[in-house]
């Protein structure tokens, strides 16, 4: 063991040093070798499927329009390079290096395993509420197979007397016509302010059948329950066999939405008003760069759309070959992700431009984000097109696929983290199938609260708090701190160099150490200072106990890090310095011995105390 003065070919060889110590875990007779992707393209497509989701289509274009059009790309691209790509690369490379899911990957610094538990909590909440969007999309898809779209007329049982199909704003521009009856309805121009479109009534009265508040859950919608069950069954059979099957399914679910987007773009640009819509989208407003909110929106959008902090990227990376070039993959995936966001904007705003021209209103009145765009603005737009049911079915099929691959990769990430807690010695033939089934069933039970009449209020609580910008920023900040300052940025760069065969550009190390943590904590504090209570449709304000539930959801992941850290420190023995040294000593996996055999041999030649034919393996006590 007395080789401290000799050359250190790689940081991993620290595990043989008296000075830095180390534990090798996971080897032995019962050890099960980790699955790997059948081909590297499986990994690329899975990452595309997971990271490229609904946020690219329904959130980025709206933020681009809201924050100065084309000028929004300046803060967006800047934060891509100082925050998005560095953390994206960090999570993938960390998973590949440690060959573990979101919990055991932090064996690199066991004191901070709370990061793994936090990401598991976040991704569990995401899996729980995100699938509701798929259930709604599936419901709309089924309803699209009719001769007349049910949200295009006011002749349905769920419509109210305030429903009006065409608003005729142009007939009411002259104040002297205020009492004229417009269209085929019995409304006057004075009543127009309170009129409601059939698509809004279909969404609120039929799909949601929404109650007056969170305190009135009401009855369950059995149609939505069936849609929710169908989507969960689909997710289960996509995930139950592991990455061998998931890697094949994403070839379809990740690529087909692009086919639909191209078809919709070709159709969209041929519609009247499309040019005006696209100009609204990309026209730069340079004065917006002076507003802090523009930079905050850019930062939060990056963290949302890159799926950072959820642990799923780590799980996907863990199935890579040890020598895969994950550095190159990170840049390719970032380009695909941001490129998809920008491209989707042309699709969305060409159709919103048509919708604005058709209704005779400014595009700012039809430009929406989130569920409002997916289930109100877009269905309205397709209802105005020739052969409307075809375009509606195409759009909602795309929506379903965009969300589906994000959903089942999220479930894969959660299940991977759970199974890594029970290594090979606890192996059971159907262990994965049982774990996936329990995960899906548990999420489905929680989802039942979201298919009630008050379900939308519950959905918004999860969306606003459980996987919000604040929780993801908190997670990303600590990931950078642990890797750069506890394990060591240079040390991890050495490890990455051993995997990919060359050392990444130092920019990554600078970002992990200084720039990215500052960006994360800056946006986090801005969110905290400018916190506003949650509302629904800017009208309904959540009760105080609703906000308490929301903060409990947020803190359930955020507190995992400090609570776990303090618990481990208090349970350890010795002085604080000894506890810290012991608890930040990496726990290496058996695969590290295999790939580091040359280094071990070189160390044994320098150190008579090491016999390369008799490698001693210590069981982890973490």
Image (tube, rainbow, N blue to C red):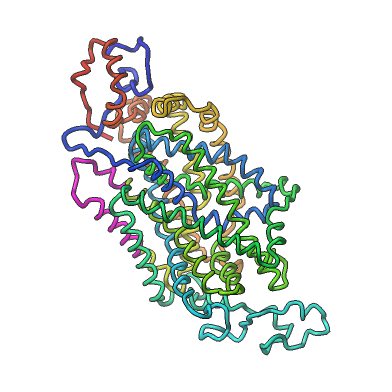
Q: Residue 233 in the image: state x and y as whole percent.
A: 33, 63
- Find residue 113 and report its image quarter: top left
Report the number of discs.
Answer: 0
Q: Residue 518 in the image: state x and y as whole percent.
A: 57, 36
Pick the quarter of the image with the C terminus.
Answer: top left
Residue 333 drawn in magenta: no
Task: Say above or below: 399 vs 160.
Answer: above
Given residues 247 and 87, the one toward you in this image is 247
Q: Residue 86 in the image: state x and y as whole percent.
A: 51, 36
Q: Give the range drawn in magenta.
A: 417-445
Task: Say above or below: 417 vs 589.
Answer: below
Task: Say above or below: 434 vs 28.
Answer: below
Given residues 107 and 250, the one toward you in this image is 250
Q: Residue 361 in the image: state x and y as whole percent.
A: 72, 70
Residue 442 drawn in magenta: yes
Q: Which residue is drawn at 82% across and 81% down?
A: 175
Residue 197 in view: yes
Q: Which residue is drawn at 18% across and 20% down?
A: 614
Q: Which residue is drawn at 54% across and 32% down?
A: 511
Compared across the picture, whether 353 is left or right of 396 comes to: right
What predominant SS class does the magenta segment belong to? helix
Q: Residue at x 18, y 48 (%)?
A: 428
Task: Say above or below: 85 vs 557.
Answer: above
Pick the quarter of the image with the N terminus.
Answer: top left
- Find residue 227 and report its image quarter: bottom left
Residue 569 in view: no
């Amino acid at each position: 063991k007395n080789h401290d003065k000799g050359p250190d070919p790689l940081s991993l060889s620290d595990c043989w040093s008296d000075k830095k110590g180390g534990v090798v875990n996971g080897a032995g007779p019962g050890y099960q070798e980790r699955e790997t992707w059948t081909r590297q393209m499986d990994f690329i497509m899975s990452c595309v499927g997971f990271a490229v989701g609904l946020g690219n289509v329904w959130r980025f274009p709206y933020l681009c329009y809201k924050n100065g059009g084309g000028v929004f790309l300046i803060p967006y691209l800047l934060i891509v390079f100082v925050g998005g790509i560095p953390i994206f690369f960090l999570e993938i490379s960390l998973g590949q290096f440690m060959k573990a899911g979101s919990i055991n990957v932090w064996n690199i610094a066991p004191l901070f395993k709370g990061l793994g538990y936090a990401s598991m909590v976040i991704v569990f909440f995401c899996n729980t509420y995100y699938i509701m969007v798929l259930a709604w999309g599936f419901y709309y898809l089924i309803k699209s197979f009719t001769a007349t779209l049910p949200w295009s007329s006011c002749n349905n049982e769920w419509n109210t007397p305030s429903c009006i199909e065409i608003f005729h704003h142009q007939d009411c521009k002259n104040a002297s016509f205020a009492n004229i009856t417009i269209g085929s309805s019995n409304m006057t121009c004075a009543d127009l302010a309170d009129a409601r479109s059939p698509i809004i009534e279909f969404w609120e009265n039929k799909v949601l059948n929404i109650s007056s508040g969170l305190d009135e859950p009401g009855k369950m919608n059995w149609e939505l329950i069936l849609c929710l069950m169908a989507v969960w069954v689909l997710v289960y059979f996509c995930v139950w066999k592991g990455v061998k099957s998931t890697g094949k399914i994403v070839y379809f679910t990740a690529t087909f939405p692009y086919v639909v987007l191209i078809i919709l773009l070709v159709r969209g640009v041929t519609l009247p008003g499309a040019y005006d819509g696209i100009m609204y989208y990309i026209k730069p407003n340079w004065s917006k760069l002076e507003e802090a909110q523009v930079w905050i929106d850019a930062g939060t959008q990056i963290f949302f759309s890159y799926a950072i902090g959820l642990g799923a990227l780590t799980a996907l990376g863990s199935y890579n070959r040890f020598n895969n070039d994950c550095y190159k993959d990170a840049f390719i995936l970032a380009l695909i992700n941001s490129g998809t966001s920008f491209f989707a904007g042309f699709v969305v705003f060409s159709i919103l431009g048509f919708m604005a021209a058709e209704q005779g209103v400014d595009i700012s009145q039809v430009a929406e984000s989130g569920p409002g765009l997916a289930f109100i603005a877009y269905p309205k737009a397709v209802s105005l097109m020739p052969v409307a049911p075809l375009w509606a079915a195409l759009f909602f099929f795309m929506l379903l696929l965009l969300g589906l691959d994000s959903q089942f990769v999220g479930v894969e990430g959660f299940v991977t983290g759970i199974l890594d807690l029970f290594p090979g010695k606890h192996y059971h033939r159907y262990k994965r199938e049982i774990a996936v089934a329990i995960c899906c069933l548990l999420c489905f039970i929680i989802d039942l609260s979201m298919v009630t009449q008050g379900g939308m209020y519950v959905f918004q609580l999860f969306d606003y708090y459980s996987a919000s910008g604040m929780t993801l920023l908190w997670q990303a900040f600590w990931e950078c701190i642990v890797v750069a300052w506890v394990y060591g940025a240079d040390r991890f760069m050495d490890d990455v160099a051993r995997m990919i065969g060359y050392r990444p550009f130092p920019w990554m190390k600078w970002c992990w150490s200084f720039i990215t943590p500052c960006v994360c904590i800056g946006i986090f504090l801005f969110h905290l200072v400018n916190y506003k209570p949650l509302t629904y449709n800017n009208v309904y304000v959540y009760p105080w106990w609703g906000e308490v539930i929301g903060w409990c959801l947020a803190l359930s992941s955020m507190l995992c890090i400090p609570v776990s850290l303090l618990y481990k420190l208090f349970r350890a023995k010795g002085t604080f310095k000894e506890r810290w040294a012991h608890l930040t000593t990496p726990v290496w996996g058996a695969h590290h011995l295999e790939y580091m055999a040359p280094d071990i041999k070189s160390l044994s030649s320098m150190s008579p105390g090491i016999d390369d034919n008799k490698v001693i393996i210590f069981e982890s006590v973490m």
